[in-house]
Image: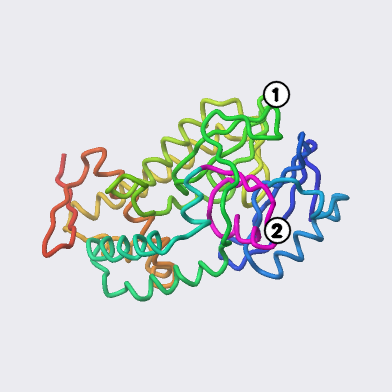
Amino acid sequence: MAQWINDIGRLVIPTPFPVGDVNLYVIKGEKLTLIDAGPKTEEAWEALQSELNELGLTLSDIEQVILTHHHPDHVGLLDYFPADMQIIGHPLNERWLNRTEAFLQQNNDFYQHVLTEFGLIQYYDKVMTRLHTELAYFCDRSLAQEICEGDEPPGLKGWRVIETPGHAQSHIGLLRESDGIYIGGDHLLAHISPNPLMEPPLPGQSERPKSLLQYNESLDKLSRYPLALVLPGHGEVFTNVNEIIPQRKKAQHERAMKVKKWLMEESMTVFDICKRLFPKAYKMQLPLTVSETIGQLDYLLAMGEVNEYKKDGVSFYSSQMR
């Protein structure tokens, strides 16, 4: 149900994804601004109109949309908005919003490479089918304006952009400096730890981003801001940021140490570890569970806790007693 929270409207929109409902926000700035848009489904479109009406608003009142990141549950409904709607976000949204054939081919090539390296190339068709299915919930739009770290978004005087890559390379949050209200997208949630998702190399780079390492750095970055109230992309609003951030980092470290213990006993591939970490979920959620698994290995490699070697193009990992 739509509600006003400290003069910011919260809209709860259904999604077809396991994460459940997504939160959108309306800010009455110099321009009436919608934060994120929801997935491209008729159910979401009807819910958006209904939720706006509960706040005494209509779709025609929206003057611009700012994106926290490019995932389909946050951008899909942009296709339902007028062609001249101002869409604003981090530059790294663009390659996903306005997908070129070259980028789609790069994405396919990337997954073929990493799935070979991770020891599960036999699942390539299944993974790509799932990823292409999710594309149906995306939009086909383009950014009208880009915003980056430290910028004041157009039409939102007193708000600042904080870049928080990890869950997505395009991820940002918006901080109102006067009272510490923070619209955080999916980077920090009260009830679950977001999955730092694997993405192809960024423009001009050849290596994939280390998403979990970025995510941890972004958590540390947020801990240095006086966040009084977090309005997240999913779930309920919360205030206990200084409790949640250490909890997230502690749980992630403990998972990595569990993986290290296994690797002290035997060498394993990413797929071997993925099946052990997610024995029930890996078949249905391969992109998510593989992203989580390689994140733990990136973390252990960065600390020097594990070793990597290749055999026939497949990476194996091991750990020695210290």
* Crowd rating for badge 1 (residues with CA inside 10 Å; few <14, some 14–19, many 20+): few
Q: Is residue 320 magenta?
A: no
Toward which corner of the image does residue 6 lie, by quadrant? top right
Marks 1 and 2, Cα distance to the nearest angstrom? 31 Å
> Counting other residues with Cα less than 10 Å from the Cα at mark 2, is it few (<14), some (14-19), or many (20 or more)?
some
Q: Which percent across, then down, holds residue 271?
A: 28, 64
Whether 83 is among the magenta residues is yes
Q: Which residue is mark 1?
A: 178
Identify whether 231 is placed above or below 113.
Answer: above
Query: What percent of the width, then of the height, locates residue 31?
Result: 76, 39
Query: Residue at point 51% right, 57% down?
Result: 98
The residue singled out by tag 2 in the image is 81
- In this rendering, position of residue 140 left or right of residue 272: right
Look at discs 1 and 2 and give the one toward the viewer: 2
Q: Earlier in the sequence, mark 1 or mark 2?
A: 2
- Which type of secondary structure does the marked residue at label 1 adopt? loop
The residue closer to the viewer here, 78 or 260, is: 78
Furthest residue in direction front, as rendered: 84
From the viewer's side, name the closer residue of 46 and 190: 46
Occupied quadrant, residue 29: top right
Quadrant of the image containing the C terminus = top left
Which element type, helix, strand or loop, lies under badge 2?
loop
The amino acid pointed to by label 2 is Phe
Percent position of residue 255, x then y? 36, 49
**Farthest residue, direction right:** 56
Residue span colored magenta: 65-90
The label number, if any, that marks residue 253 in the structure image: none
Q: Position of residue 169 (x, y in %)?
A: 44, 46
46 horizontally vs 217: left or right: right
Q: Tag 1: residue type?
A: Ser
Which residue is found at the position 66% from the left and 42% from the top? 231
Left-right relation of 2 to 287: right
